[in-house]
Image (tube, rainbow, N blue to C red):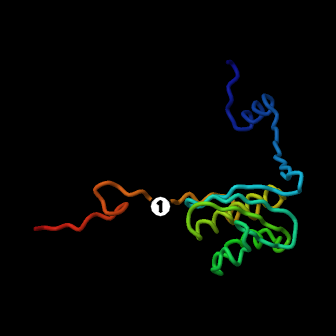
Amino acid sequence: MTDQINSLEELGAVAGAAAPAVEIEISREPVRDELGRSYATGKRKDAVARVWIKPGSGKVTVNGKDQDTYFARPVLQLILRQPFQIAGVEGEFDVVATVKGGGLTGQAGAVKHGISKALQLYDPSLRAPLKAAGFLTRDSRVVERKKFGKRKARRSFQFSKR
């Protein structure tokens, strides 16, 4: 190799000649079934939610019951409305969800995660606000298991000096 590169300009010229810059643009296509619905699976703690969304009047059905009946606490209903508020499509989609496992709070979080994923599959332009709000990331925190020789996961038995 007889050519020696002494400056950044020379390096840029050599690199530019070797490989042209290629920009890759990712274009996402809407994912819908033959009925016009989008499907996603949401998870939180031990709860798993299967969620279908389709254009409609904003009705939310969870395990065959209305949202207000299944999630009676207003805080849980607020959790379910968050993805629609962030995306700016409140009252435009009907949701049908089936949830198994966990408690009510975990189930509400799982349905929220599933709604967010289904919304971004239905309309890829909604991905940016949902991702910025952190709704597309699965909350991986789960209950720590109990260890042997301990009373709970970390709590020890009471120490007795005598």
Number of marks present in the image shown:
1
Query: Whole-percent x and y of residue 14?
Result: 76, 30
Quadrant location, the C terminus: bottom left
Q: Quadrant of residue 69?
A: bottom right
Question: Could you classify mark 1 by the number of other residues whose Cα lies within 10 Å: few (under 14), some (14-19), or many (20 or more)?
Answer: few
Instruction: Return the residue nearer the eye: 149 or 125.
Output: 149
- Residue at position x 62%, y 66% in the image: 107
Residue found farthest to the left: 162
Q: What amino acid is found at the position of numbered circle 1 in the picture?
A: Val
Residue 129 is left or right of residue 27, and the answer is left
Residue 43 is left or right of residue 30, and the answer is left
- Report the residue marked by disc 1: 143
Query: Whole-percent x and y of residue 43?
Result: 63, 58
- Residue at position x 74%, y 37% in the image: 9
Query: Whole-percent x and y of residue 95?
Result: 78, 66
Instruction: Return the residue nearer the eye: 31 or 58.
Output: 58
Is residue 127 visible in the rendered image? The answer is: no
